Image (cartoon, grey):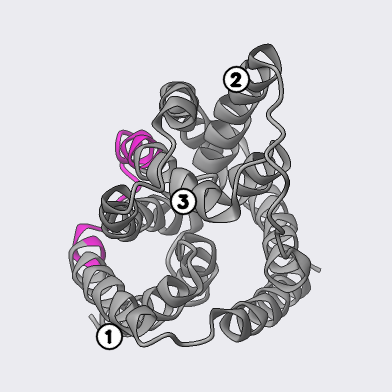
Amino acid sequence: MTTIIVASLLVFLFTTVLTVAGVGAAFIIIPTFFWLGIPITEAMAIALLLNAISMSFASINYIRYRLVNFKTAIPIIILAVFFSPLGAYSTKYFSRNLLILIFVLFLIFAGSMMLFYSPKKKKEVKGSPKREFKTGIGLGIGAGYLGGLLGVGGGNFIVPALVWLGFDPKNASATTAFIVVFASLSGFFGHATLGNINWNLLIFSAVSSIAGALVGSWLMHRKLEAKQVKKIIGIVLYAIAAKMMWGLL
């Protein structure tokens, strides 16, 4: 029970901070749960659902402010929802060490995105519909499968691609948040069918995630500086990756 309480408190803290930063918390919740002794497949399953919960709260506001591009989101969602459970199912074919190694590489990628990726608004130069369609297919398949496999929802793969296509960063983030809700839920159900769920931990963590999302949204209205938060997150992710890699060695 002590582990569940500690985990729930950390979920509240991370969700609050990461909502301020504008990103989902799954990628930092998973290694945190793992450190607390929770099996990594269980951690991935719960983190996916918590991701869906927090991004749902964010998406409500994004839709209200008309920041979500549904024409782009819907095709990606359809493919991501299909491939995310496949990614979750694939975890049974990966060894524990290989799964941890893959996640370490993702942490390094996510940390680098937090520290060095600063999207700038491009001129409105739209690619051809054929190019956008192909990119949408690639994003739906790739982000869906990897998101389900790593338990992260795929958002960190989608945002840079949408910005690269010419999306305004705000629209890219909002559209991605909407996509991640469905991709995360799909991945969660994929893990749930394998029995990788600690229901007590899930319930307590879900309550903490909702509370954290509400507090984080309130803090955003107070206009806190998200750039500084992102830098801190990037450093923390590097530190976690280094610790997990050291454990493997």
Q: Quadrant of residue 77?
A: top left
**Marking on residue 137:** 2
Q: Position of residue 52 (x, y in %)?
A: 33, 51
Magenta stretch bounds: 185-202
Residue for point 74% across, 63% down: 117
- In the image, what residue type sits under mark 2? Ile
The residue at which mark 1 appears reads as 2
How far apart, in angstroms, are the residues tagged by discs 2 and 3? 27 Å
Residue for point 41% across, 71% down: 19
Magenta span includes 194: yes
- In the image, what residue type sits under mark 3? Thr
Magenta segment's dominant SS is helix
Residue for point 81% across, 69% down: 249
83 horizontally vs 96: left or right: left
- In the image, what residue type sits under mark 1? Thr
**Would you call the spot at circle 1 few (<14 residues within 10 Å), some (14-19), or many (20 or more)?**
few
**Marking on residue 41:** 3
Residue 86 or 62: which is nearer the viewer?
62
Figure quadrant of the N terminus = bottom left
